[in-house]
Amino acid sequence: MYKYFLIQHPNNILSSPIEYLTGVSTIKGDLLRKEINVFTFKDLLEYFPFRHIDKTKIDLINNLHEGMDYVQVAGRVVEKKIMGERRAKRLIVHLQDETGIIELVWFQGINFVEKILTTGQAYLVFGKIGFFMGKPQIAHPEIEIYNSQNATGKSFLEPIYPSTEKLKARGLNGRQIAKLTQELIKKISTKDVPENLPHNLMLQFKLMGRFDAFTQIHLPANEINYQQAVRRLKFEEFFLAQMSIQKLKLNRHKNSRGLVFEKVGNYFNEFYEKFLPFSLTNAQKNVLKEIRKDFGSGKQMNRLLQGDVGSGKTIVALLSMLIAADNDFQAVLMAPTEILAQQHFNTITSLLKEMNIGVQLLTGSTKTKNRKQILSGCENGEVKILIGTHAVIEDNVVFKNLGFAVVDEQHKFGVAQRAKLWKKNDIAPHVLVMTATPIPRTLALTVYGDLDYSIIDELPPGRKPISTTHRFENKRSQVMDFIKEQINLGRQAYVIYPLIEESSKLDYENLMKGYEEVKSFFPEPKYWISMVHGKQTAEIKENNMQRFVNADTQILVGTTVIEVGVNVPNASVMVIESAEKFGLSQLHQLRGRVGRGADQSYCVLLTGQKLSNDAKERLRTMVETSDGFKIAEKDLEIRGPGEIEGTRQSGALSFKLANIVDDRPMLEVARNAVADILEKDADLELPDNQPLKTYLLSIKSKTRWGKIA
Ligand code: ADP
Ligand code: MG
C-alpha cells in the first residue's frame, strides 16, 4: 500500500501508520499525510498546538471587549433567525447570560445548525470574538449543551492545532485534531518516548523529562508545565542539531586526510618581503596563522572566513595560495561574478607582476583558443593560480595537483558546487570560503557549523568612516550638486538603482530614466557616465566597468551587479536610489564600495516619503553604524532567521519550536553543552550519555531503512 509500511519499525508504537489510530479513517489518513505531513503516530506527536485555551473559564458577556481573542461564554438561546438571500444568507442566534446578549453567526451549515439548536436551552459556546458595530459576535463558534460537568470538568488547557481548509472540510479542524492527539497520548507510555538527554544535563538546566514534555505540550496540566515542556523540547531541538553538526565536524577532523603543506617557501617569502604593499593587520595575521596550522595538520581544511567589506580578505587568500604554490600545489580562486573574477585577477596579477608565477583567468567568456591554453596549463601544472567564476570547477578543468581552493562570497555557491571542488584531487584540496555577508557569530556557527571559522574583525588602519545620510527624493538635485562638488575634487561616484528581479521591466525602465536624469545633470563632454546592469553582455559590462575603474568616466550608474567586491578607491560617493527597497546587508555591501581610498567618503540613501516601519529601521541603522556585525544583528532582528541570505535551504534553521533569533541564548547553551560532551566523551561511552547514544542510533537506523525502501 504505502511505501511507509515497508519501513515500519516493529517495536515502537510511534512508527505505526496514522490509520492505526482510533478515529483516523483511510480518507482522513490520506489527508493528514498530504496536508500536514503526518504519516505516523510520531509525526502526530510532533505536531504541536499553536496555543492553548483555558476552558475552565467562562466569560461574562458584559465583560467581553475588543482585544480579546478566543472566549467562552455560557447562556441560553433566546432567538434564532435565518437572514439574507443566497450568498448573504446567514443564521443569527442570540445567546443570553445574566449580564447580556451575544450574537452567534453561521454562514455555512445554516439549516443543520438551526435544527439542532433549541430555543431556551443552555449552551457552552467557544470561539473567536469579533465586534460588529460595537456589538460582540462569534462566527462559527464551537457549541455544546451546557451542564455543570462540561463547564468545570476540564481541568487542563485545551490545545488548539493549526489546520487547513481541506482538513476542516473533512472533520479535522483544530479541535478534532486535538481529539486525535489525546487518543494518541492515552496509548503511549514513557518507554515509547525514552529520554535522550544525559541526566546530568537535565539536572543542570532543570529540563523536563522527554515523555512528560511531549504530553504536557499537548495537554498541559497548567501554564507552567506548558512553558517547561516547550523549553525542554526547544532545547532538545538545538541540542540534537548541534550534536549532528559538531559530530560531523569532529569526524571530518578525525577521518579526513588532508594534503600536507609543510613549508613556507620562496613564493611566499619573496612576496611578503618585497611586494606586500602594506603591513597586515593583526586580524589578518591571525587568520593566516590559523590557515597555516590547518595546512600542516594532515587534515583537510574547511574554513569559513568572515570579514566585513574592505577588511582585506583578498590578501589573506593570496598569501595562502602562495603557500600552496610553495608546496608544489595549484590553487584556485573562485568568484561569483565575471566582474569580480576579473577584478581579483587584475589585483593579483598586478601584485605578482614582478614574480615568476603562472596566474590565469578562466570565466564563461574566455575565448576558445585562450581557454585551451589555460586548460592545458592547469593539466601540466604551469598554472599555479587559477582565478575565475564557477567555470573553474567544470568537469573539463583538470588539474595536475590542485591543493587549495578559495571560494569568495560563498553564499552564492551551493553546497553541491563545493562538493565538486573536493573531487578535483584524490585527496580533497583544502577549502577556504570567504564571505562579507555579515552573519552574527552564533548563527554562523549553526549554519556553517560543519566549517571551521575565522574572522577578520579589524579594518586596515587609516580608513575614514563613511558619512551616511538619508535624504528624500525631492532633495535629489541637492544630492546631484554634491556629487558635482566631489567630481570637481577629482573623485568618482556611484548611483545605484534597485533591481528586484533580473527580468523586471519596470526596474529597467527606472534605471534608464535614472540614467537620463543623471545625464541631464552631468552633460557630456564635461562629464562621462558608465552604465552597468545585468542585461548587458559580459563584454559590455566589463568594458563600462573598466572605464570607471580607469577613471575615464566619473559616474557609474548601475544596478546591484556591482554589489560584491568591486574596488575603485577613488570613488567617494555612493548614492542609493529607492534605498527603502534594499535589504540591510545589501545596503551595507553597496556602501562598502566607497571609503576604500584615503578620502572622506559619503553614502546617500535616497527614498520616497512613505516608508514602512521596517524600512525606517533599516535606514536608521545604516546612518547610525557601519559595523557589519551590528548590522547583521539588526537585520536578523528585523527580518528573522528565515531570510538570511544563503541559509534558507540549509535546513539548519528549520526548527519546529525553537527560533534562532528569540532563543539564541538557549542555542548558545546547547552548543556549549554539546561541545563539552564531545570533548569529554566523543564516542559517547560514558553511562550518562547512553540514552543519547541509543537515541542517535535509533534515528540513524531509521534513515537507513528509509533509504532501502
Ligand atoms: P574584502 O575583505 O572586502 O574583500 P579587499 O581584500 O578587497 O577587502 O581589501 C580592501 C582594500 O583594502 C584593498 O584595496 C586592499 O588592498 C586594502 N587592504 C587590505 N589589507 C590591508 C592592510 N593590512 N593595510 C592596508 N590596506 C589593506
Ligand atoms: Mg572581497
Image (cartoon, rainbow, N blue to C red):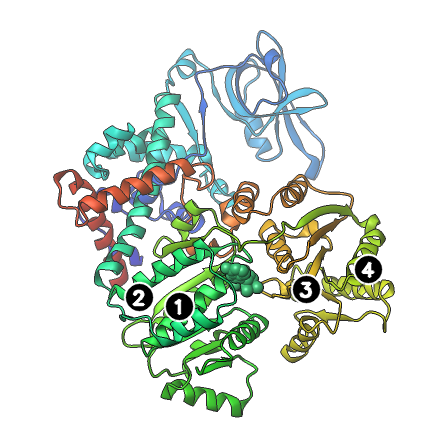
Find numbered disc 3 in the image and state the secondary structure of the residue it sits on. Answer: loop
Residue assigned mark 4:
484
Q: Residues within 10 Å of mark 3 (few under 14, many from 20)?
A: many
Report the side of 162 relative to 247 (left or right): right
First along the sequence among labels 2 and 1: 2
First along the sequence among labels 1 and 4: 1
Residue assigned mark 1:
320
- 2 and 1 marks in contact (CB < 8 Å): yes
Q: Residues within 10 Å of mark 1 (few under 14, many from 20)?
A: many
Which amino acid lies under the numbered mark 4 shown in the image of this protein? Lys
Q: Nearer the viewer, residue 458 or 302?
A: 458
First along the sequence among labels 2 and 4: 2
- Seen from this angle, which residue lies furthest front? 274
Which amino acid lies under the numbered mark 3 shown in the image of this protein? Asn
Ligand 1 has an atom within 8 Å of the beta carbon of the residue at disc 3:
no
The CA distance from mark 3 to mark 4 is 15 Å
- 1 and 4 marks in contact (CB < 8 Å): no
Which amino acid lies under the numbered mark 1 shown in the image of this protein? Ser
The CA distance from mark 2 to mark 3 is 37 Å
Q: Decide if residue 237 is in sight here.
A: yes
Find numbered disc 1 in the image and state the secondary structure of the residue it sits on. Answer: helix
Q: Nearer the viewer, residue 29 or 630?
A: 630
Residue assigned mark 2:
295
Residue assigned mark 3:
570
Report the side of 267 relative to 576 (left or right): left
